[in-house]
Amino acid sequence: MSQQADLFKKLTAHCKEYGFIYQSSEIYDGLSAVYDYGPNGVELKNNIKEYWWRSMVQMHENITGIDAAIFMHPKTWKASGHVDAFNDPLIDNKDSKKRYRADQLVEGYLDKIEDKINKEVEKAQKRFGDSFDEAMFRQTNERVVKYTTEYEEVSKRLATAMSANDMAGLKNLIDELEIGDPEGGSRNWTEVRQFNLMFNTQLGNIAGEEGKLYLRPETAQGIFVNFLNVQKTTRQKVPFGIAQIGKAFRNEIVARQFIFRMREFEQMEMQFFVKPGTEIEWYNRWKETRMKWHLAIGTPAEKLRFKDHDNLAHYANAAVDIQFEFPFGFKELEGIHSRTDFDLSSHQELSGKKLQYFDPELNENYVPYVVETSIGCDRMFLAMISNNLIEETVPDAQGEDSSRTVLKLHPALAPVKCAVLPLLKNKEELTSKAGKLSIS
Ligand code: ATP
């Protein structure tokens, strides 16, 4: 087992042993990609939510919160594009019978090229020491240049196939790159097909399609449909934001990375409504603000990076991920998207209700543009545990080196801030005083 895989295994075991996270319905052998938070876990998760809420809502005069319902009118998801386009490309391996996301198989291939480049750079760094010029090395080393060219070509082909919904192109790419099943290596693949990620259920009193309801796949739409309600009741002027923390549900095809990819998870989202034409300026400001938020809680800068989207969603004119270095590599922790006026305009069109803002300075009505910041609470939880669960060596009672596992969380997030512990257990005089102190 690689060092990283070993670390990840230790982390999941620690989460269970210390009451942070349990597999859902464990006595029935669990439900895949669904998890329960235990006594320590719920405290840590609440603290993460509070840290986000305080800094995003309470510390910003022009941002207010809401708590919208999970169920929404089914037309919401037609307008948002989720019914028609919230798909992932699915592929099955005929030998192993395992199911994968086709785009992630290609991304896995790209990750391997990136690893090869990093290894070459590391080797050279060791060889040349202080005189090493990394930028020059990356530009001139034959092997690195070859890998980099391949990386760029494959990324471009992936982005083109994804944005054109070209499932045959994606399958060709997998075949040409000779990508095998990550578990058994077999290249006996089915065709790639689209799979909608929304869970649905049925209203009790209406049969058929009419009564079909979806479990929301994102919290954002609850904000959009309430945009005018909030603007009118708070009398906010553009630019202003609406924030929400809540559950979201996605029928993820592949969910094998603990709480990184769950079928039921929690999002912390903020939609910021701005004057059309100013969205890119605000997008850049939010990028900066959100990165500072991560750094302020003690996440080291080298574990965070921005990654622009190669493949923009149907609603966006700019999008970036804040990636964190999880034990399985750099992956998305948060998304910042310039969503244009897509959502409000679509809801306006389908509902027939005006969703416009009257700008008193311009003396005109317009549909505001939106910049969104969206972070998964569970991914933030995983980032905090993986960054802060460390092995350290300390002298034991005999002065010998002994290793121990420590979870060094930032005080704002720690489930337990301090403890009052009587030195002697059975001394009533001490235990009663300690008891009084701990609840005062
Ligand atoms: P990914 O590419 O990893 O599937 P996404 O781009 O679909 O994520 P968004 O729709 O931008 O994710 O959702 C915003 C945030 O919600 C993500 O940055 C992530 O932190 C969180 N999130 C999304 N899907 C899941 C999931 N299945 N489990 C846990 N958190 C998730």
Image (cartoon, rainbow, N blue to C red):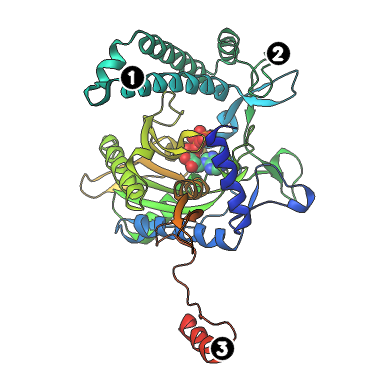
For marks 1 and 3, give the CA distance.
64 Å
Mark 1 closeness class: few <14, some 14–19, many ≥20 residues within 10 Å? some
For the N terminus, give its image quadrant.
top right
Q: Is mark 3 within 8 Å of ligand 1?
A: no
Would residue 282 be visible to someone looking at this image?
A: yes
Please tell me whether residue 343 is drawn above or below residue 93 in the rendered image: below
For the C terminus, give its image quadrant.
bottom left
Indicate the amino acid at tag 3: Lys
Disc 1, disc 3: CB below 8 Å?
Answer: no
Which residue does the numbered mark 2 point to in the structure image?
188
Q: Earlier in the sequence, mark 2 or mark 1?
A: 1
Quarter of image, res 259: top right
Indicate the amino acid at tag 1: Ala
Kind of element beneath mark 1: helix
Residue at 37% across / 39% down in the picture? 304
Task: Judge left or right: residue 30 versus residue 100.
Answer: right
Q: Residue 6: x percent and y percent? A: 57, 39
Instruction: Give the residue furthest to the right.
Output: 28
Q: Earlier in the sequence, mark 2 or mark 3?
A: 2
Q: Residue 243: x percent and y percent? A: 42, 53
Task: Judge left or right: residue 223 versus residue 366.
Answer: right
Q: Nearer the viewer, residue 359 or 414?
A: 414
Which residue does the numbered mark 3 point to in the structure image?
427
Which residue does the numbered mark 1 point to in the structure image?
124
Q: Earlier in the sequence, mark 1 or mark 3?
A: 1
Query: Which of the two discs, 2 and 3, sits closer to the camera?
Result: 3
